[in-house]
């Protein structure tokens, strides 16, 4: 992604003042990047053992409801990666144990039109854990062609701006925080 485009995206994210604005921007970027659907979800701790989830759901109809009804969050291999990593994950890079609940989660996602994708973990200094995922309903070869350019090039700082906006802390929350050396290597 070129730096000029990144700056424009950062400005558009910072200017978004409602969840509908953010959802529309994410849909637009999702399509521009060649993906079919997206989700941005952020778990915000409210008390020691409680949290609220803020979600911009651009996933296929019915998936998020099914995901929570089936308690897929308990075995989601993408979320397991995101909880302990800061680098993006291509779903096709997952090593799943045959017959495991994690494998069933990914197979069921595919039946909803999410056969492959890329997910970027979002960790904030305040302890929030979030994800930004883009998915595809494409055969593996086509999916790889779309995913390859973005695996190491997902936007880290604009997402920080987005996290700040969602938390009502303003864009300065993370947007101007210096990227860690590992984050800089990804940019």
Image (cartoon, helix red, strand yellow):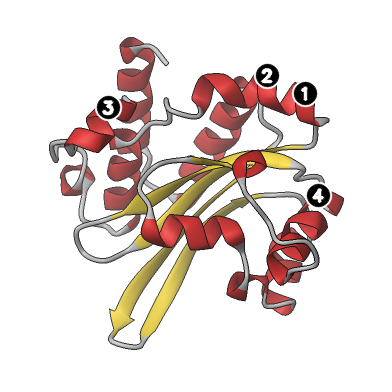
Question: Tag 1: Cα neighbours inside 10 Å, few (<14), some, or many (≥20)?
Answer: few
- SS type, badge 1: helix
Q: Would you say the residues marked 3 and 1 are in contact, meaning their CB atoms lie under 8 Å apart?
A: no
Position of 85 relative to 100 (above/below)? above
Question: Tag 3: Cα neighbours inside 10 Å, few (<14), some, or many (≥20)?
Answer: few
Q: How many marks?
A: 4
Give whichever of 33, 26 is nearer the camera: 33
- Tag 2 residue: 145
How far apart are the alpha carbons under marks 4 and 3? 31 Å
Position of 168 relative to 138 (above/below)? below
Q: Residue at horizontal 34%, vertical 44%?
A: 162
- SS type, badge 3: helix
How far apart are the alpha carbons under marks 3 and 2? 22 Å
- SS type, badge 4: helix
Quick one: label 3 or label 2, which is nearer the N terminus? 2
Q: Residue at horizontal 14%, vertical 40%?
A: 177
Give the label on residue 185, or none. Answer: 3
- Tag 1 residue: 141
Quick one: label 1 or label 4, which is nearer the N terminus? 4
Question: Tag 4: Cα neighbours inside 10 Å, few (<14), some, or many (≥20)?
Answer: some
The N terminus - image quarter = top left
Quick one: label 3 or label 1, which is nearer the N terminus? 1
Q: Would you say the residues marked 1 and 2 are in contact, meaning their CB atoms lie under 8 Å apart?
A: yes
* Discs 4/3, front: 3
- SS type, badge 2: helix
How far apart are the alpha carbons under marks 1 and 4? 15 Å
Give the label on residue 110, or none. Answer: 4
How far apart are the alpha carbons under marks 2 and 4? 18 Å
Quick one: label 4 or label 3, which is nearer the N terminus? 4
């Amino acid at each position: 992604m070129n730096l000029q485009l990144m700056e424009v995206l950062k400005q558009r994210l910072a200017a978004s003042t409602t969840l509908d604005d953010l959802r529309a921007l994410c849909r637009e970027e999702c399509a521009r990047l060649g993906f079919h659907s997206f989700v941005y979800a952020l778990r915000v701790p409210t008390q020691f053992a409680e949290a609220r989830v803020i979600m911009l759901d651009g996933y296929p109809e019915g998936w998020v409801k099914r995901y929570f009804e089936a308690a897929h969050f308990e075995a989601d291999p993408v979320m397991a990666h995101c909880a302990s990593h800061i680098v993006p994950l291509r779903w096709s890079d997952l090593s799943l144990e045959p017959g495991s609940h994690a494998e069933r989660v990914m197979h069921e996602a595919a039946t909803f039109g999410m056969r492959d994708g890329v997910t970027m973990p979002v960790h904030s200094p305040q302890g929030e854990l979030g994800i930004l995922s883009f998915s595809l309903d494409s055969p593996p070869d086509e999916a790889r062609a779309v995913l390859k350019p973005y695996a190491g090039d997902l936007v880290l700082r604009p997402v920080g701006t987005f996290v700040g906006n969602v938390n009502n802390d303003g864009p300065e929350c993370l947007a101007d925080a210096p990227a860690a050396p590992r984050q800089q290597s990804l940019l």
